Amino acid sequence: MGVALTELLLMKEIDLDFLRNKTLIVDAPMWLYQFLSSIRQRDGSLLTDSKGNVTSHLMGLLSRISSLAQRSIRLAFVFDGEPPVLKKLTLEKRKAMKIEAEKNFEKAKEKADEGLMKKYAARTSRLTDEMIEEAKKLAEAFGLPVIEAPTEAEAQASLIVRNGDAFSIATNDADALLFESPRIIRNLNMTGRKKKANKLSFQTINPDLIVLEDNLRHLGIGHGQLIALAMLIGTDYNMGGVKGIGPRTALKIVKKHGNDLKSIFNEAKWNEHFEFGWEEVFDLIRNMPVSNDYSLNWSDIDEEEITKLLVDKHDFSEERVRGQIEGLVESKRKANQKGLGEFFG
């Protein structure tokens, strides 16, 4: 998911206090996949309730929403709409990869190889419609805005930030820069840890701030060239990019030809690697459908709805859930605020 731009980008390490009283637009699908990948049992299997329903995504949301809210960080969630046709091709490829990973996981399980089980389990994450609907319900029960994008969540979130209605997108995907998000906050993990690739172990990490304009100046390119650069490396719409071209080689090609996009993709021999033209991908990214018809209104916490979803339906500890909610109430009291509606607003 996303583009492999990060090794080229300027990032500023920040702490959570920097984000106090700021509004962040959450790339909801990215967060949910992150929770499904990282919140697992020792053998790599997902957390489930007594009925076998997956709960890893809800566990992650509960913890992160409550913890960030206690630091006066306002959240709003954007979910994907209908994926573009080119994205559907990528989703089919990812589905095939997950099926293969599931087969390898079962083989590792038969051999009781816990190391391989963890490795392949992290590659099998599937986000179902039911998980998405439950995530929406939980966010809304916390009084947080939930917005459905016409197509891509990152594109809609980028518009909201560009409109000045939020400070930044909260996402680990650099492709939000392709949709002209002025800022991205990566690694927004309350634990200060991030899951290592293909493992269930973690490494210490702090949030990073990426500023679009700073990076365009740093790279010495314009926004159209940034899109071309990403396409050479690989995006959600041309998975894998042009074989043999990494980030630094891609940057050299882009800077060599400037705004002459045709020459950029001719040198990269795009047509030898893809059955569709580069123009189709470029135009899709540049003109991704978004909508100004959104609402950012925060409301009171619905403790009854949270309890109904987490405790009654999914066997969460009532004590733990209540503790998370009470933590928000205590934070509000210390801040001498008038009510939870104002706390989130």
Image: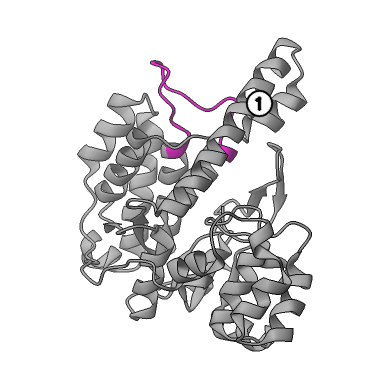
Q: How many marks?
A: 1
The answer to whether residue 335 is above or below residue 64 is below
Q: Is residue 324 left or right of residue 199?
A: left
Q: Circle 1 is placed at which residue position?
A: 42
Is the magenta region chiefly helix, strand or loop? loop
* The image quarter in which residue 26 lies: bottom left
Q: Residues within 10 Å of mark 1 (few under 14, many from 20)?
A: few
Q: Which residues are magenta?
A: 37-57
x, y percentage for residue 165?
Answer: 32, 76
Front residue of 155 and 117:
155
* The image quarter in which residue 220 lies: bottom right
Q: Is residue 46 magenta?
A: yes
Can residue 82 be seen from the camera position used here? yes
> Residue at coordinates 34% horizontally, 36% vertically from top-left?
129
Q: Is residue 218 left or right of residue 307?
A: right
Front residue of 327 and 47:
47
> Residue at coordinates 57% horizontally, 33% vertically from top-left?
96
x, y percentage for residue 252?
Answer: 77, 79
Badge 1 amino acid:
Arg
